[in-house]
Amino acid sequence: SEGASEEDLIDIGIRSMGLSELKPFDPKEKIIEFKMESVSKKSLLKMNLRQFCNETLSDSPAPGGGSVAALMGAFGVSLGGMVANLSAGKRGWDDKLGYFSDWAVKAQQLKDELLFLVDEDTAAFKKVMDAFALPKDSADEKAARSAAIQLASKYAAEIPLRVMETAFKSYQLLAEMAEKGNPASVSDVGVGLLALRACVDGAAMNVRINLAGLKDEKLKSALQEKVRKISAESESEFKKIIQIVESKLG
């Protein structure tokens, strides 16, 4: 299947060019884009699962529910992509290779977007904290601080809204895999579906809490309406797809 991750493609390139024959080739050290990225910021995505869970469990307020919601969405999409890849390689389904490969590629794109938002949600939270930490002694400082808080709060609401939108788009992947994917993997579709719904619902909570302090009532109302719309449509999609999954579980 063409739905390979960036890391898999790099590994294939390293092996095909024999870059590790003399000594281990570390792409994080040898590929300039990766090296610059690792220097520029501390990414949650660079942690292993235990480190991520430990960081979440700690007394640090971030990563919090927003980043975890985005990660749950990425897991849900990844399960859908896994089913696409397994279906693409299923014996006797050669005529369906292109169809499932296309979905695997889409899954990679959706997964990457949600993983980006895992880090971005924590970055958005930091912007809010930085804004609240600004000086407030003079009238000018108070005005600048208030404006910064409003701007940061708006961004902190927009990020989980993007999570909701991306996760909602991912339902189509799960629907196709539930309907047409390898029947032996239907439970994986079901778990992915549950993860996507949790992602949407969790992200919705984070939009709402970040809107609480927003003074622009028109903007607040517009974003609240988007949340309500996506949440309702998400529940509708979930119910339709879970029925297909349940019917095939036996």
Image: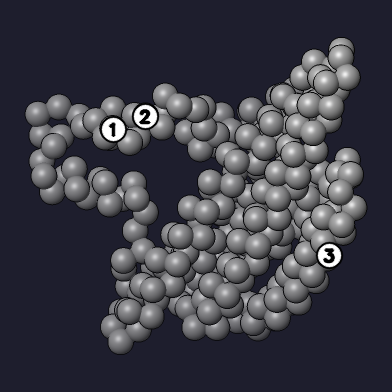
Q: Is residue 150 left or right of residue 168?
A: right
Q: Nearer the viewer, residue 248 or 95?
A: 95
The three-letter amino acid code for the residue at tag 1 is Ile
The vertical placement of 157 against 171, above or below, is above
* Residue labelled with disc 3: 225
What separation in Å lies between label 1 and label 3 (alpha carbons)? 43 Å
User: Residue at 73% across / 37% down in the picture?
Assistant: 152
At label 1, counting other C-alpha atoms closer than 10 Å, the crowd grade (few under 14, some 14-19, many 20 or more) is few
Q: Position of residue 130 (x, y in %)?
A: 72, 24
Quarter of the figure that contains the C terminus: bottom right
Q: Position of residue 111 (x, y in %)?
A: 50, 56
Q: How is the image coloured?
A: one colour
Task: Please tell me which residue lies in front, 24 or 208.
Answer: 208
Residue at 28 percent of width and 32 percent of height: 32
At horizontal 70% and vertical 44% (from top left) the residue drawn is 155
Label ID, residue 32: 1
Q: Secondary structure at mark 1?
A: helix
Q: Is residue 30 left or right of residue 123?
A: left
